[in-house]
Image: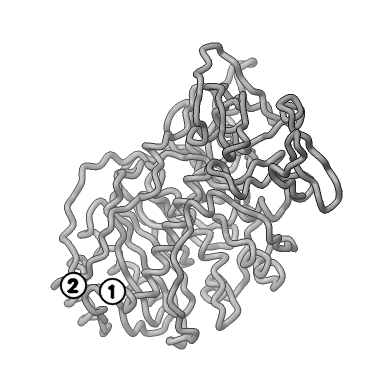
């Protein structure tokens, strides 16, 4: 059985209400039965298409019925046909086996069962960080709460390949150009998104500190909002550090190259550096960060087929995670440690988009369920908790009274995951011209809670996607348009 509709050469819909009950008591509906061609001589028949199935399962007994032979031997397990010709090898995969269809025109791999190691769990929690870098961070003891992990060569993460596969890169400059944090800030905007966020936003302003590579993201309805945020951020960072900020660097977009920015930089004694038109490499620090954040967000959305309207929540979470795991190789420290002087803590992180259960509040009937179904979207503002989309009410709440099931996406009856037309592979339009375009205001309906100041488990404030994801101990409260979700006072550390 599989959950991938595109692999079938023929598929007969199933009219009956057949369901598959998963090990976690989740339910997957059988949508059809058909054939999957592996090669010209090997076709998997009577394969069930099951909704919400996270792994592809191959029945050994069904292979026997089709006349194939399966041999399990140390180092040479295989599937062969009646003439004893090799059909495909069977490879060990942790404590399970994986069938490798290397010459297949359909699926490349079929898993007998999914691995449940800490390496997979932390790979997904940290925004599908590469296995090698994850093992390196673990071995260097740079992050509190991260256990000892060892990379495995044969692991293949399909969401990672879908979301992060890129062409070969240019050789980076391996040196630090500034002497301290907040000396030089790189700025750029990403967008417009092809889908409006659940909070009515179309653009993302990304700002990166040159020394630490610490990042801020700010979500906007139009590019014209960029100046107001940069103005406030520069003043706050100057008060926080006590050191003079030297320069800002951006492309030639109209949101940066205007009279307002020019007057502000002149009044603050800032040099505003511009990259050469149409030369993205001149603003490479923030361009690479843009790619990193969008790739992480796209991968997290792809894993559980979360609807694209939650792209802002995904980028928000990607920025939060990236600030804690990005390793400044030359200095051998994370961005978090370079900014705050202490190692980050990651034990509270959870897998984006996973199923979760939120404790209901108020006067409940004795036999009424004590929790509401939802899926995890990120980390809270103004409290030490989590952001959850409630399925029954269609709104975001912030709470610490939540239990997570990180093994499965939300499969509650009545909730349909995104279809192919909703998730896609491209979130943003290709808007990279340095000359810039004046921001057009799009209609918006703010559904996200208003942002406010908070401190996370490390004492670092954070803001919701309706405004900004910021982590500065001295930031003043920021409020945005939109209703505030009253989830009560949160005092428990996640």
Q: CA distance from mark 1 to mark 2?
A: 9 Å
Name the one closer to the observer, 64 or 175: 64
Q: Left or right: where does residue 144 sit relative to residue 459?
A: right
Name the one closer to the observer, 65 or 208: 65
Q: Which mark is residue 32?
A: none
Q: Residues within 10 Å of mark 2 (few under 14, many from 20)?
A: some
Q: Residues within 10 Å of mark 1 (few under 14, many from 20)?
A: many
Q: Residue at x 43, y 54 (%)?
A: 315
Vertical position of residue 450 compared to residue 254: above or below: above
Image quarter for residue 151? bottom right
Q: Left or right: where does residue 367 sit relative to residue 230?
A: right
> Circle 2 sits on which residue?
257
Q: Left or right: where does residue 116 sit relative to residue 403?
A: right
> Which element carries disc 2, helix, strand or loop?
loop
Q: Left or right: where does residue 101 sit relative to residue 251?
A: right
Counting from the top left corner in percent of width and height, residue 465 is at 39, 51
Counting from the top left corner in percent of width and height, residue 128 is at 56, 55
> Circle 1 sits on which residue?
250
Tag 1 and tag 2, C-beta contact below 8 Å: yes
Farthest-out residue, right: 74
Q: Residue at x 69, y 66 (%)?
A: 138
Q: Is residue 361 visible?
A: no
Counting from the top left corner in percent of width and height, residue 343 is at 63, 70
Farthest-out residue, front: 83
| Of callouts 1 and 2, the N-terminal one | 1
> Which element carries disc 1, helix, strand or loop?
strand
Q: Residue at x 49, y 22 (%)?
A: 414
Image quarter for residue 326? bottom right
């Amino acid at each position: 059985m599989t959950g991938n509709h595109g692999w079938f050469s023929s598929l007969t819909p199933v009219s009956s209400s057949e369901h598959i009950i998963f090990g976690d008591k989740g339910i997957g509906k059988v949508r059809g039965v058909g054939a999957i061609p592996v090669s010209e001589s090997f076709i998997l028949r009577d394969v069930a298409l099951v909704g919400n199935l996270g792994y592809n399962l191959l029945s050994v007994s069904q292979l026997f019925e089709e006349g194939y032979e399966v041999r399990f031997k140390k180092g040479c397990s295989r599937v062969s046909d009646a003439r004893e010709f090799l059909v495909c090898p069977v490879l060990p995969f942790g404590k399970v086996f994986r069938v490798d269809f290397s010459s297949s025109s359909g699926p490349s791999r079929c898993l007998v069962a999914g691995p449940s190691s800490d390496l997979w769990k932390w790979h997904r929690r940290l925004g599908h960080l590469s296995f090698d870098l994850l093992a390196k961070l673990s071995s260097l003891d740079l992050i509190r709460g991260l256990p000892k992990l060892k990379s495995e060569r044969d692991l293949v993460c399909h969401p990672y390949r879908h979301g992060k596969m890129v062409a070969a890169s240019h050789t980076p400059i391996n040196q630090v150009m500034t002497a301290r944090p907040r000396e030089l800030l790189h700025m750029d905007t990403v967008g417009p998104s092809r889908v409006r966020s659940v909070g009515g936003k179309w653009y993302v302003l990304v700002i990166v500190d040159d020394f630490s590579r610490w990042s801020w993201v700010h979500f906007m309805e139009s590019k014209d909002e960029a100046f107001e945020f940069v103005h406030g951020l520069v003043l706050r960072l100057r008060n926080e550090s006590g050191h003079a900020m030297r320069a800002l660097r951006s492309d030639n977009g109209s949101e940066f190259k205007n009279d307002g920015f020019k007057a502000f930089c002149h009044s603050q004694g800032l040099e505003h550096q511009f990259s050469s038109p149409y030369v993205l490499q001149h603003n490479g620090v923030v361009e690479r960060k843009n790619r990193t954040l969008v790739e992480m967000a796209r991968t997290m959305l792809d894993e559980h087929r979360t609807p694209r309207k939650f792209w802002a929540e995904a980028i928000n979470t990607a920025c939060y995670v990236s600030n804690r795991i990005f390793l400044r190789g030359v200095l051998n420290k994370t961005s978090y440690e370079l900014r705050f002087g202490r190692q980050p803590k990651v034990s509270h992180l959870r897998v984006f988009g996973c199923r979760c259960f939120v404790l209901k509040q108020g006067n409940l009937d004795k036999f009424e369920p004590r929790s509401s179904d939802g899926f995890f979207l990120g980390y809270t503002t103004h409290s030490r908790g989590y952001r959850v989309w409630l399925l029954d009410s269609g709104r975001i709440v912030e709470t610490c009274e939540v239990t997570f099931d990180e093994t499965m996406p939300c499969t509650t009856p009545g909730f349909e995951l995104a279809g192919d037309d909703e998730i896609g592979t491209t979130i943003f339009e290709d808007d990279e011209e340095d000359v810039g375009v004046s921001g057009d205001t799009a209609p918006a309906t703010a559904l996200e809670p208003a942002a406010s100041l908070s401190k996370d488990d490390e004492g670092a404030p954070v803001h919701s996607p309706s405004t900004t994801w910021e982590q500065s101990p001295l930031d003043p409260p920021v409020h945005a348009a939109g209703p505030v979700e009253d989830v009560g006072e949160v005092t428990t550390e996640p």
